[in-house]
Image (cartoon, rainbow, N blue to C red):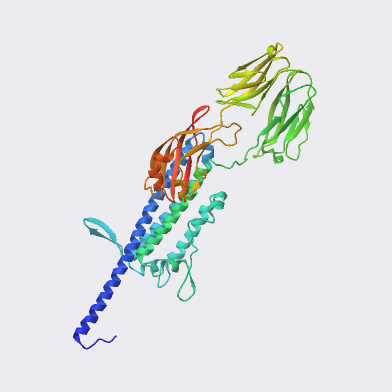
Amino acid sequence: MALPAEPRQKMINLMYLVLTALLALNVSSEILHAFEVVDKSLVTSNSNLKTANQTLYTSLEAKLNDPMTAEKAKPWYAKAEQAKKISATMDDYINLLKTELKAEAGAKMVEVDGKQVEEYKKDDLEAATRLFGNEKGGKNKGPEFEAKLKKFREDMLGIDPEIRKEFEKTFPVDASYKTVGQDGKEKDFTFAYFHMTPTVAAITLLSKFQNNVKNAENQIVTYCHNQVGAVKVVYDQFAALVGQSSNYVMPGEEIEINAGVGAYSKAAAPQISIGGASMPIGDDGRATSKFKVSGSGSKSVPVNVTYTKPDGTKETKTFEVKYTVGTPGGAAVMPDKMNVFYMGVDNPVTIGSPTGWDKTTVSMSNGTITGQGSVRTVRVSTIGKASITVVADKKPTTFEFRVKRIPDPIFKVGSGKVRMPAVEFKNQQYCRAELENFDFDLRFSIVGATVYFSGANFPNPVPATLTGNNLSGLASLIQRCGPGSVITFDNVKVQGPDGPRTIEGKSIALY
């Protein structure tokens, strides 16, 4: 615009221009400061994720060294280590990009308050363009960065087919973002993120990608960790199996013997003989022999199974199928629930006698049996075998049973899932131990556990002690949890009908 002739008006116009320039500089400074605040927050979040991941690695290593979980932990520990290596390589590459970008923006060390501090032109609009683009001799790092992000995604998903299935649609790292410029044309990855972008904003974007990388690592390692308690069984070995329809029969009744190879695979090309006779193999890979028994007392039938192992070698297993032929009107003992006795619970049995109960006595070894007549209750306390002897009309008959420990219950919070919305977890008041797929109606109570809080909102893992099943004692830590937090329940102690025991814990990842 033309300057007015009057000196006073000239001065007013010049002051207006200066004021406008100062105002523009102030807004720019505030925006740059906002990017710095966001970058610091992302760097802190990355550090938290790194700590959370390390907690998972430590727990996996402990499970690898525990004989009880080593077999399951071995393959998933290796997959987690692979994810760790891929993530570290990508993280190092992004840190190198940050260093090169600051160098393009004139990075140098200066002394501030007696300390050496790195300074660079945070508002430089050309530095990111020069480094990532190819205009005017640019270093063309944009396409390289895009390719590495895509490779990172593919390498992480390629660790295991189950990981790809779980995360392919929700994987945090995505380099497919495009934008449309003022000319209406679609712009590529480099233009969308780094063209004419202030240096501090580009640094923040790189921190954002690092956060995505660490988050991806956390999700996959959490998945690997949780599979140690949920490993899908893969049949990679064959084993000969022999079964029978009954081990106590009467003269004229039939007994059926089944023999085959583990998983009943015909691919193992089994050759089976029962009682010295070669048997035909059915479509399901099994051989069946059915015959009528005779006589009385203890009997046995030899079974030979020859099969081909996965390595191509042959192996033969020999079994003795034992059974007892009773005498007409003989005694019988029948468990009401299962064919084994469990420690710490009442095992109901029904006893039959060919004579009146005034001429029948019942005794037991390695356990106690109570009750009257045919309705009895067995209690056992030692793993192994127990036997019940029924003496009817001065003729003793002994029945042998296996004794087992009650299976371990499953530790659960809320729905019991290993990934849970943060708001759902924060509303939980109790944890529990459930006994699944068991014939007895039993209850286990939580005695205590060690709980680790890590991930988002926990710069360093925070250990806590749980007493009982009430989570109220952890309320302050639970309320700090949010998406990205990981809560690990370890060393879970429970009290059951057969006494105290320690069961497998669980890691819950919040989203």
- Counting labels gives 0
Quarter containing the N terminus: bottom left
Indicate the position of residue 128 as horizontal and vertical percent values.
38, 66
Q: Residue at x 60, y 36 (%)?
A: 437
Q: Is residue 367 above or below residue 237?
A: above
Judged left or right of residue 231, residue 426 is left
Q: Residue at x 23, y 80 (%)?
A: 14
**Side of 364 relative to 202 (left or right):** right
Which residue appears at 43% of the width and 41% of the height?
58
Horizontal relation, residue 35 to residue 495: left or right: left
Residue 82 visible: no
Foreground: 279 or 408?
408
Looking at the image, is 87 positioned above or below residue 24? above
Which residue is at the far bottom?
5
Residue closer to the observer: 270 or 244 = 244
The image quarter containing residue 475 is top left
Splitting the image into 4 quarters, where does residue 408 fall?
top right
Residue 16 is at least partly visible in this image: yes
- The correct choice, above or below, for 401 with respect to 239 in the image is above
Q: Position of residue 169 (x, y in %)?
A: 54, 56
Residue placed farthest to the top in the image? Answer: 394
Of 436 and 179, nearer the camera is 436
Q: Residue furthest left?
A: 7
x and y, in percent, of residue 46 in the image: 39, 53
Residue 261: x and y in percent read 69, 36
Q: Observer-nearest residue: 225 or 363? A: 363
Task: Identify the residue at horizontal 33%, vertical 68% (top origin).
Answer: 124
